[in-house]
Image (cartoon, rainbow, N blue to C red):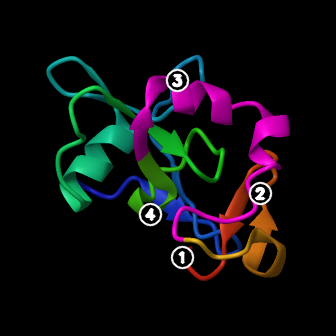
Amino acid sequence: MTERWVIDDIYLCWLWTGQRNAQGYGTLYSGGTKLAHREVYETEIGPIPTGLALDHLCRRRNCVNPMHLQPVKQAINERRKLWRNRVKEKTCQFGHSKFEHGRRTPEGGSICLICG
């Protein structure tokens, strides 16, 4: 796959520059519509476990950086969409303190600078 993103120097998001759907997710049109973040994750990391959705930890829907994507159950993904639940989390997925190592994204999410 040709790289169709630019890297945000501050948050290290890989921002999709190709087409996006109405919800803001990057899309690929090869044999049907496929979400770009899912394709990049599967190319860079491997298959997404059955029954799980990819949560954008940075809260940027057009980010395709696989390090910003976490496979979770859909119920968890929905819960995390709410900012009031997101701010209650005190650590990133790898246990680093968001107080010490976290930075907010323009969309209201957060990025761990150690993992980023």
Q: Residue at x 72, y 75 (%)?
A: 97
Out of 38 and 72, give the one closest to the viewer. 72
- Which residue in the protein does label 2 denote? 105
In the image, 10: left or right of 14?
A: right
Q: Residues within 10 Å of mark 4 (few under 14, many from 20)?
A: some
Callout 1 secondary element = loop
* Closer mark to the observer between disc 3 and disc 2: 3
Measure the alpha-carbon separation of dots 4 and 2.
15 Å
Q: Earlier in the sequence, mark 4 or mark 2?
A: 4
Callout 2 secondary element = loop
In the rendered image, residue 104, in percent from the top left (x then y), is placed at: 81, 61
- Which residue in the protein does label 3 denote? 75
Measure the alpha-carbon separation of dots 1 and 2.
15 Å
Question: Amino acid under label 4?
Answer: Met
Question: Amino acid under label 2?
Answer: Thr
- Which residue in the protein does label 1 denote? 115
Q: Are marks 1 and 3 in contact (CB under 8 Å)?
A: no
Measure the alpha-carbon separation of dots 3 and 2.
23 Å
Question: Amino acid under label 3?
Answer: Ala
Magenta highlight range: 71-94
Measure the alpha-carbon separation of dots 1 and 3.
24 Å
Q: On the image, which quarter does residue 73 sit in?
A: top left
Q: Residues within 10 Å of mark 3 (few under 14, many from 20)?
A: few
In the rendered image, residue 35, in percent from the top left (x then y), is placed at: 36, 31
Q: Are marks 4 and 3 in contact (CB under 8 Å)?
A: no
